[in-house]
Image (cartoon, rainbow, N blue to C red):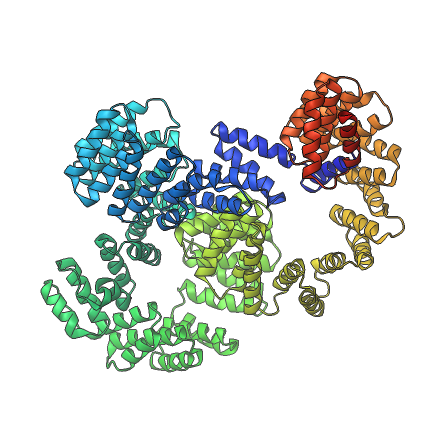
Amino acid sequence: MSRRVALLLFCLALAACHAEPEERLRRAQRSLEAGDFRAASIDLKSLLQEEPSNAEARFSLGLALLQGGDAQAAIRELELARGLGVVDERVIVPLARAMLVSRRYDDALRVIEPARAQSEAKRCELLIMRGEAELGAGHAAAARAEFERALAIDSNDVAARLGLASARLETDGFAAAKREADLALAHVSQDPRAHVVMATLYLRDRQFEAAAKSFDEAVRLVGKNERDASLIAALAGLCESQLALGRAEEANVTIERLQQLAPDSAVTIYMRARAAFIKGQYDPARTDLERILARDADNRPAQLLLGAVNYASGNLGQADMHLAAVLAAEPENNFARQLLAESRLRQRKPREALLVLEPGGTAPPNSALMLALAGTARVQAGDLDAGLQYLDRSAATGSADPSTVIQLAAGYIAAGRTETAVRILDSLKAEGSAGYRRDLVLITAQLRSGDRDGAIERALEFARRNPSAPEVQALVGGLLVSAGDNREARAHFERALELNPASPAAHVNLGKLDLLEGHPGLAEKRFQEALRLKPGEPATLVALAQVALAKGNREAAVKWLETARRDNPLAVEPRVLLAQYYLSQRDLQRAESLASEAIRLAPDNAAALNVLGVTLASAGRTRDSVDTLKRAVAANPNSARAHFSLATAYLAAGEVERALTAARKALELAPGHVPSMALVAALESARGHDSDARRLLAEIRKIDPEYPPLAMLEAELAMRTGNPQAAVKVYDAALARSPTANIAVRAYAARRAARAPKPLEPLELWLTAHPEDTAVRLVFADALAVTGDETAAAANLETALRAEPDNVAALNNLAWLYHKRGDSRSLALARRAHELAPRSPQVADTLGWILLSADEVPEAVRTLQGAAALAPKMPEIAYHHAAALARSGARSEAGRKLRTLLAEYGEFSDREAAEALLAQLER
């Protein structure tokens, strides 16, 4: 029984008093059966943080995620479950279904093997799924063959007939497909699936009225069965038809019903985004589509619509990314091709636009719009002859004047072609305003190419030629600050202010320089003047917040940033800074809200993505955190901070190898970054690479010997390498310097492992200072029981129960100690523990054994049978159940269970007792 006591203490003390793993698994499975997929997922994710190799939990989580609409995550969990030993007979169908929903058709085809089916019905089911995969992959003929094979097994299978209709739409056209759908409808006229397929055929044939009518009939047939997937499909198709017919109000009603039935479904979210886009409501449309893609990165309809939303709202980089992904997957999608070319041209990326318009060097599609786009791209790329030919054919014109060349150079810069831009601009002979613009773009080009010295030299010459232009003086001042020449920078900033005293930017530039040089009071005066000149200017308000922070006034800094946010609905920086502040204060809800707000404004803002990712990790949303921080790394691949944040998120998600890779990358980008060094050291130690871990810890000690986690890392390494004596010294020093409950428990474990004197002392000292810490008291009680002082152990458990009367571990363990010494109070305590945790096998086992000892045999048998069902792989519980059966007179059943138990488990604490009982039964 001591193992049970220790197990309960470990789970409750170190897992924040969560329910037992087996209990949470059973509770999650009940939630899954009841259709509460979110509750099931929460329990299962919590369980898997403690037991990442629990195959049944992985499998159940996969099912919950699939039913809850997160097919991508479902695939990950089901594949892990398969790797952990869940048999293919159970896992293949849901895994393949998740792959189909995620449009991973090739992957689905690899896992669906009808020939391995154990029955004709299962083979038929797999053939249908294989047909769906072939159809999704664009292999209509192969899909048709699979559906026909399924029909050869069962000619009345509705799903196979409807699949064949969909396949024949591609191979033989609408009329042939409709004939198959008519056959299905004649056989099952009341099956909503048949009406959904028929309506889809009408929709594809642009017969929107007929489609709406058939979808409406499918909705009627489904009726009130709100869990039927056909209802979601029918409502989505109906909404699509209504939008195509311009019936916005009807579509809104349909979307509202979808939201009631499946608020988290990708279908619901997509239709809501479609409606919002048509109304010009781009922000909510973008939010919804990004939510879909966060779960299913390959959802092409969502990618295409998000590309259109970003293009319409001016977020061209994001539009480019999504449209390019669609076009790569669907080369015949001319709408994606057109929109991507327009987006790239607006970004001044003519070469990239030409890659879209002239795939493989071929001529663009012969339409006026495509020809006009190709002509513009050719002109901007410097291919004037080909460009003019295209433009003439599309009745458009092109120009090689200085303005066109300057715009072309700006496009090359945006595309990263700075050398080409510099070459073109250097060869351009232009005077006046055109020459002025050429020089500005040239300086930008040199900066983008990394030639800061050349850019400064050109900027100084530019300033000499334009001594009366304040913006030129400010440009030069900024370049000189970046080069560390503050004195010369100040001269140019002051000249800019002299030329335009009413310029807020001139005051802000000088104020930032004052702040950089340690004069916050002077900086604040300049910023206040800038704010007077232009109230509400976000850059000025952020600068005032920076002054407040420099003075140590956090409250004032937050006030300035909130003002900047309120007065500037499109400003990103104040939202990012506020999110960082609230994250530091552990106000995770506000931090997430502000970071999300910033990302909606600038989806590629690396700082916003980083703070959102860290916030999500702090809230325990590890997968969302990883996905967000991957975007942060993509937005700024040279940021050590972004890679470090991603590493910590991977670690929280249990992806240790990826965490190590990201941490190493952070260390490569910033070799002296101590947190990255510490993380790499910890991960290397966990992998058994002790020499690497020691080397990194030694480097940390040189850089920052007072780094707080350093001592703990060294102690953990000592424990892992079999040197608990060294760990004792480190933990004792840590306790003396800054004691915590975690250190006290670790110090006790180290002292016990080292057989040091007074092993209980760290726990005793902590409880003297913190008598209310029930979790540590439970550890202390267990430690006392291990030493044989069960009286003191019971006293501490009684103290814990006075503080927390419903603490299950305390109730269970005290019940057992009372039972051992014959105290009749044991039964009442065990019953109370079981009432509070009816799904805990350990608690049920304690109660069952006490009942058996009290000759309450029938109730003992029932209770121990329940415990064994909850924990079929715990041999001690199986033995107790067999003992109860033997006492009840079921000797034959008890013998069978004991023989099975002894055959399956070589060593367990009650083996001798089990062998003795079996020998007695066989006499």
Q: Is residue 839 left or right of residue 310?
A: right
Relative vertical location of residue 916 with respect to residue 135 in this rendering, above or below = above
The residue lying toward the viewer, choosing from 456 and 158, is: 158
793 to the left or right of 348: right
Specify whether 846 is left or right of 452.
right
Residue 248 visible at all:
no
The picture places residue 443, in percent across and down from the top left corner, at 36, 76
- Above or below, 683 against 96 in this view is below
Pick the front one: 428 or 620: 620
**Quadrant in the picture for residue 815:** top right
Point out residue 412 in the picture as x, y percentages from the top left corner: 31, 71
Picture coordinates of residue 210, whole percent (x, y): 17, 31
Quarter of the image containing the C terminus? top right
Work out whether 675 lies above or below 90: below
Count of marks overlaid on the render: 0
- Give whichever of 828, 479 is nearer the camera: 828
**Residue at the spot 43% in from the left edge and 51% down from the top edge:** 599
